[in-house]
């Protein structure tokens, strides 16, 4: 049964995401989903797909940086950016270039 769009990740989906990612304990999957929905007004399934990819592709600082940016918490984003090396910054900066399309295609079964 589909829950109303509360911006909180369905526990079954969260369990599946956590099972596939090594760093999930360090990354706040629910915060990412909620921030994604709020910041971009994208459909919940799209925002539920992206934290798994972020968890695979980004360091914990990169993941937290994206959440801070989506939440418009620039003080936290700047602090995290100061702790990230150039590769981490590049990975975080490029994350939203292709990932939404990848998730959209996956959700459509392409």
Image (cartoon, grey):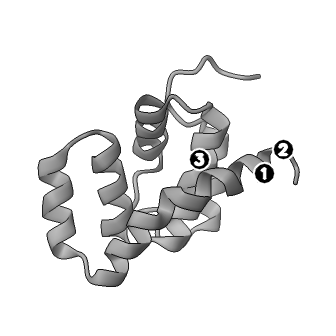
Q: Residue at x 49, y 41 (%)?
A: 33
The residues bearing labels 3 and 1 have C-alpha atoms spaced at a distance of 20 Å
Relative to 23, 26 lies left or right: left
Quarter where residue 77 is shown: bottom left
Discs 1, 2 touching: Cβ within 8 Å: yes
**Element at label 3:** helix
Q: Position of residue 74 (x, y in %)?
A: 17, 48
Q: Residue at x 40, y 38 (%)?
A: 35
**Label 3 neighbour load within 10 Å: few <14, some 14-19, many 20+:** some
Identify the residue at the far right of this view. Answer: 109
- Residue denoted by label 2: 108
Q: Residue at x 40, y 34 (%)?
A: 39
User: 106 and 52: which one is in front?
Assistant: 106
Relative to 21, 95 lies left or right: left
- Residue denoted by label 1: 105
**Element at label 2:** loop
Q: Which is in the foreground here, disc 3 or disc 1? A: 1
Quadrant location of the C terminus in the rendered image: bottom right
Discs 3, 1 touching: Cβ within 8 Å: no
Quadrant location of the N terminus in the rendered image: top right
Q: Position of residue 49 (x, y in %)?
A: 63, 49
**Label 2 neighbour load within 10 Å: few <14, some 14-19, many 20+:** few
Compared to residue 37, the image places residue 97 above or below, namely below
The residues bearing labels 3 and 2 have C-alpha atoms spaced at a distance of 20 Å
Name the mark on residue 14.
3
């Amino acid at each position: 049964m589909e829950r109303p769009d509360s911006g909180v990740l369905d526990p079954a989906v969260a369990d599946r995401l956590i099972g596939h990612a090594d760093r999930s304990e360090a990354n706040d999957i629910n915060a990412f989903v909620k921030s994604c929905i709020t910041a971009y007004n994208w459909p919940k399934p799209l925002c539920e797909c992206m934290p798994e990819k972020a968890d695979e592709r980004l360091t914990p600082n990169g993941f937290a940086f994206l959440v801070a940016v989506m939440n418009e918490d620039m003080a936290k984003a700047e602090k995290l950016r100061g702790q990230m090396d150039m590769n981490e910054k590049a990975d975080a900066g490029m994350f939203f270039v292709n990932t939404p399309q990848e998730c959209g295609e996956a959700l459509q079964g392409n």
